[in-house]
Image (cartoon, helix red, strand yellow):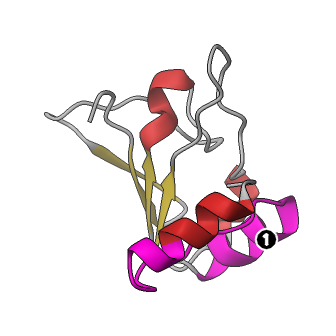
């Protein structure tokens, strides 16, 4: 998020179990490389979601990492996002698993 007050509120609300990130290109790249799971939850009302995670960045992630794109209804916030279904919910890119079911 870019709203530091919202990030602080989440930190305290969830007793330090959820770690938000002040959104910047560098911060996203650093965290995604080390993550076991990335949840993309970008909403810009009336617009498509920006692509925050590139294919090159996915290639640098740990094998078996998981990416969940909640923004798939707005075009997705990962470069490799394409909509999936409950019947066939996942696909693999560079040894990372994508879950991009619309209206989850």
In percent of width and height, residue 43 lies at 58, 33
Q: Residue at x 40, y 83 (%)?
A: 17
Q: Residue at x 33, y 28 (%)?
A: 102
In percent of width and height, residue 34 lies at 61, 82
Q: Is residue 31 above or below residue 28?
A: below
Can residue 82 be seen? Answer: no
Q: Residues within 10 Å of mark 1 (few under 14, many from 20)?
A: few
Q: Quadrant of residue 83?
A: top left
Q: Is residue 81 above or below residue 9?
A: above
Q: Nearer the viewer, residue 63 or 17?
A: 17
Is label 1 in a helix, a strand or a loop?
Answer: helix
Q: Is residue 73 above or below residue 42?
A: above
In percent of width and height, residue 4 lies at 72, 63
Q: Residue at x 75, y 77 (%)?
A: 30
Q: Quadrant of residue 79?
A: top right
The part of the chain drawn in magenta is 11-34
Q: Nearer the viewer, residue 1 or 50?
A: 1
Look at mark 1 in the image and give the residue it sits on: 27
Q: Nearer the viewer, residue 2 or 89?
A: 2
């Amino acid at each position: 998020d870019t709203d530091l007050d919202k990030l602080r509120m989440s930190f305290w609300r969830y007793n330090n179990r959820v770690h938000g990130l002040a959104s910047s290109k560098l911060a996203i790249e650093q965290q995604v490389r080390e993550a076991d799971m990335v949840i993309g939850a970008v909403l810009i009302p009336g617009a498509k979601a920006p692509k925050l995670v590139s294919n090159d960045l996915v290639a640098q992630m740990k094998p078996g990492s998981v990416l969940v794109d909640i923004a798939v209804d707005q075009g997705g916030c990962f470069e490799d996002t394409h909509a999936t279904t409950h019947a066939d919910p996942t696909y693999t890119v560079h040894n990372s698993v994508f879950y991009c079911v619309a209206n989850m």
